[in-house]
Amino acid sequence: MKLVVVSAGLSVPSSTRLLADRLAAAVGRQAPVEVEVVELRDLAVEIAHNLTNGFPGRTLAAAQDAVTSADGLVVVTPVFSASYSGLFKSFFDVLDKDALEGKPVLVAATGGSARHSLVLEHALRPLFAYLRAVVVPTGVYAASEDWGAEGLEGRIERAAGELARLMTGLSALPGPRPARDDLEVVPFAQQLAALSPTGPSGG
């Protein structure tokens, strides 16, 4: 299975990339995955050009193809102004609108203060829900004080396990789910009447 990690860290070294690597390693401990990392810092100029002219450069196109063909994604952004970074959002803006449909995604973020931890719920989760991805229940936020502290590793392992199970389950399917033409739709009133102790004519 192919796991693609999208990191929007800007500095070198980057705590965002560090968290991304730890999440990918945790997924790899729970499922056989081939990991590919997309560093958005290296794609910033091509992303800007794509936004203005509508055409991706060669490196950006390869990154888009990697994300589209992935069995699962780990996406990590630094927090800027209480939300995801502009670079992070711009990358997903230039993806095909159907690229993430049904794709398992683990969302994560880094920031200087634990006060921004709700960015996972008020920014990242709605973004990927809009893109029709399947976001795992556990998001991972790492503030500066979380590194080396108790709790972060447990969240990483739990989120990675959720992603691994989703990826494994989807890869086990033989193909697209067949349409169910054999399902019978029973009106609610009829179902309720069948449950009545006096039968359909009961009051």
Image (spheres, rainbow, N blue to C red):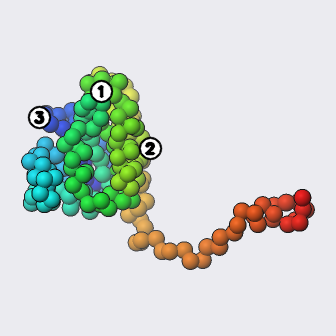
Place residue 119 in its image quadrant: top left
Residue extending furthest bottom? 181
Question: Helix or strand or loop: what does disc 1 sit on?
Answer: strand
Location of the N terminus by quadrant is bottom left
Q: Is residue 192 left or right of residue 125?
A: right
Question: Helix or strand or loop: what does disc 3 sit on?
Answer: loop
Instruction: Say whether disc 3 or disc 1 marks the residue closer to the N-terminus.
Output: 3
The answer to whether 48 is drawn above or below residue 156 in the figure is: below
Q: Position of residue 49 (x, y in %)?
A: 10, 52
Q: Nearer the viewer, residue 93 or 170?
A: 93
Q: CA distance from mark 3 to mark 1?
A: 17 Å
Residue at the spot x=13%, y=34% of the render?
A: 11
Instruction: State the residue position of label 2.
Output: 137
Can residue 32 be seen here? The reply is no
Q: CA distance from mark 2 to mark 3?
A: 30 Å
Q: Position of residue 107 (x, y in %)?
A: 34, 43
Instruction: State the residue position of label 1.
Output: 143
Q: Nearer the viewer, residue 10 or 49?
A: 49
Callout 2, which amino acid? Pro
Place residue 181 in its image quadrant: bottom right
